Image (tube, helix red, strand yellow):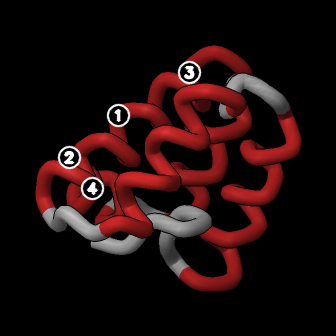
Amino acid sequence: MAKKFFNLPRLVQVLLLLIPVVGWIIELIIRWSAVAEKFTALNLVAAILFTVVGWGWILNVLDIIWILAFKHLFLTKV
């Protein structure tokens, strides 16, 4: 699932993350699928961190900036 999301055009990725509830759900799915696809401690910590405190706008905005700059979510590599 994470690879499919990162294959989308960058504008679509940003728009999906900007929608309040949809963005949170998309990020949860992407982070946990990244853990399932490529298990690393960094992916696991990022998924747990986002699950616990990811409903805030700070991590969401950070992820949008990170996608624009580095083409992946903050602390998540696939």
- The amino acid on which the numbered mark 4 sits, given as a three-letter code, is Ala
Residue name at image x 52 percent, y 77 percent: 71
Rendered-image quadrant of the C terminus: bottom left
Residue found at the very far top of the displayed protein: 21
Disc 3 is placed on an element classified as helix
Disc 4 is placed on an element classified as helix
Q: CA distance from mark 2 to mark 1?
A: 8 Å
Label 4 vs 3, first from the N-terminus: 3
User: For residue 34, which numbered disc appears in the image?
Assistant: 4
Picture coordinates of residue 11 (x, y %)?
60, 58
Is 25 situated left or right of 60 in this image?
left
Q: Which residue is mark 3?
A: 22
Q: Which residue is mark 2?
A: 1
- The amino acid on which the numbered mark 1 sits, given as a three-letter code, is Ile
Picture coordinates of residue 4 (x, y %)?
23, 55
Q: Which residue is mark 1?
A: 29
**Most foreground residue, 68 or 63:** 63
Near mark 1 (Cα within 10 A), the count class, few <14, some 14-19 or many ≥20, is some
